[in-house]
Amino acid sequence: MPIHPELDLVIERDVNVPAAALWRGWTEPELLMQWFCPRPWRVVECDIDLKPGGLFRTVMQSPEGESLPEGVGTYLVVEPGQRLVWTNALGPGFRLQPAPAEEHLGFFFVVDLTLEPLPGGGTRYRGVCTHQTTAAREAHEKMGFHQGWGIALDQLVELSALPP
Amino acid sequence: MPIHPELDLVIERDVNVPAAALWRGWTEPELLMQWFCPRPWRVVECDIDLKPGGLFRTVMQSPEGESLPEGVGTYLVVEPGQRLVWTNALGPGFRLQPAPAEEHLGFFFVVDLTLEPLPGGGTRYRGVCTHQTTAAREAHEKMGFHQGWGIALDQLVELSALPP
């Protein structure tokens, strides 16, 4: 998808782990919970029904033990090992979601994740997060998108480099 | 998809034409333009890129020749001859759409169309239109959902019964 600079936030990095391992990290709840939000925050609940229209649900918890409202979304594209598109604007069965609560990610987004194999066994990891408005993009950026997604990716790479 | 009575509007009817003909009516622009809105309104422009994330665009025109703002959406599920899911909440490439203009369908919806073959060559035609809020469902119903979709289906059946 071509980047829209006023609506999109992008993370792209070449990492030294195979696409298959990164895919597992994104699609298996017990793995996702170990990297998906920057520590000392953690994901304490995760449901994944890996198909278009299937549930993707996470609950994040602060270091003080306070849980955020659950994040509910659905998958739009599932191409194993290669591409995963999901959004919080639709829920399971493609139902339109109520407007998200202000206190956390108070806006809709669509994430388009692509994993491109590189010579030597690494992967070009690219996540594009699109927003409905420029204001939502700016709010997400100020919330620390780049740092947050960067740290989470560090955690995913660390996890993915472990022996299976 | 199970029906949610407060969020969904449903049209279901057994019709005496094959699913393949109804599918063509929904997916070929030159056919869709002949039935998609109740006459004397008409569809004067239509673009269809029939794949998940592909463009679905229509422009409707009043009998007085006034065009409505274009309706832009995308497909979520494309199962030829059987099921078509599309929404105006996302556009091509699954981009989040701006809130729709008040003057026409001023809300987001998702349509889940299923075509079930019946013994004897007919089809059980079922369209479920889901909304984000009860208020949107009510507004759509008052706008004449049942009458409008009913007349449009009459027109589709009439068209589909023609020799190819």
Image (tube, coloured by chain):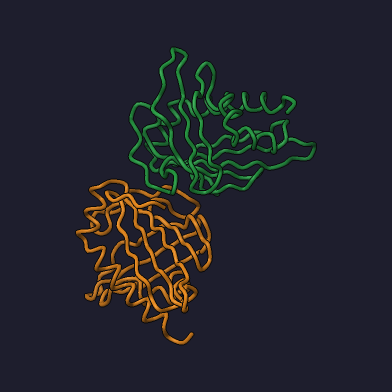
Chain colours: A green, B orange
Q: Horizontal and vertical percent for residue A144?
A: 47, 25
Q: Is residue A6 visible?
A: no
Q: Is residue A156 visible?
A: yes
Extreme bottom residue here? Answer: B163
- A18 sits to left or right of B73: right
Q: Residue at x 58, y 25 (%)?
A: A35
Extreme front residue here? Answer: B119
Image height check: is A71 above or below B71? Answer: above
- The front one of B144 and A40 is B144
Q: Residue at x 52, y 49 (%)?
A: A52
- A38 sits to left or right of A158: left
Res B91 → quadrant: bottom left
Locate the C terminus of chain A and report the quarter of the image it occupies. Answer: top right
Q: Horizontal and vertical percent for residue A153?
A: 60, 28
Extreme top residue here? Answer: A64
Q: Residue at x 37, y 72 (%)?
A: B14
Q: Horizontal and vertical percent for residue A53?
A: 48, 48
